[in-house]
Image (cartoon, rainbow, N blue to C red):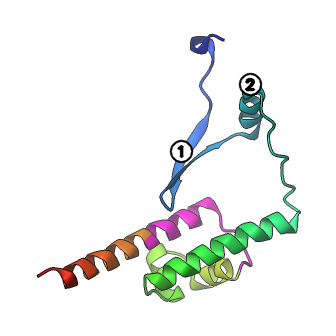
């Protein structure tokens, strides 16, 4: 296979909660799997509640855990993230799947809050 003649894969790189991800079109993913000789996992139907609910529950649990560890109320995290408190409440109750922009706002706000808490703790412990 001549790699120079191949066109680059159209993708976006993102980092969420310290983990890097690549977002690419499903057709590109399928082609990569075909070339690698591996089977792609069957696509989940958006109407399938179990997979959808697992994602919501996982996101909600992580968000609640991090928010509480940082000592933030829902209202404070929502304010720092620039989203409505009602939106954060629905996310934490698993009532809605936030879009990428909302998740990004929440992650950035949590990261900043955690860094501030760590800095504050460091300053308390320093002589």
| Of the image marks 2 and 1, the number of the one nearer the N terminus | 1
Residue 59 at x, y percent in the picture: 64, 70
| On screen, residue 112 above or below 77 | above
Circle 2 or circle 1, nearest the eye: 2
User: Callout 1 environment at 10 Å: few (<14), some (14 to 19), or many (20+)?
Assistant: few
Q: Which mark is residue 107?
A: none
Report the residue marked by disc 1.
Answer: 13
- Residue at screen point 38% across, 71% down: 112
Residue 93 at x, y percent in the picture: 69, 83
Q: Which mark is residue 35?
A: 2
Q: How many numbered marks, from 0 up?
A: 2
SS of the residue under disc 2: helix
121 relative to 108 in the view: left or right: left
Residue 21 at x, y percent in the picture: 57, 48
The question of residue 100 being in magenta is answered with: yes
- Residue at screen point 59% across, 15% down: 3
- Residue at screen point 66% across, 68% down: 98
The span picked out in magenta is: 94-110
44 relative to 122 in the view: left or right: right
9 relative to 111 in the view: left or right: right
């Amino acid at each position: 296979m001549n790699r120079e003649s191949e066109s680059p894969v159209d993708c976006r790189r993102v980092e969420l909660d310290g983990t890097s991800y690549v977002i690419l079109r499903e057709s590109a993913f399928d082609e990569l799997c075909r070339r690698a000789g591996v089977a792609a996992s069957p696509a989940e139907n958006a109407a399938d509640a179990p997979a959808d609910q697992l994602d919501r529950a996982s996101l909600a649990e992580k968000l609640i855990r991090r928010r509480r560890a940082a000592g933030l109320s829902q209202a404070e995290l929502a304010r720092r993230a620039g989203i409505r408190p009602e939106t954060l409440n629905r996310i934490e109750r698993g009532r809605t799947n936030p879009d990428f922009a909302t998740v990004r706002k929440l992650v950035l706000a949590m990261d900043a809050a955690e860094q501030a808490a760590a800095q504050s703790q460091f300053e308390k412990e320093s002589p």
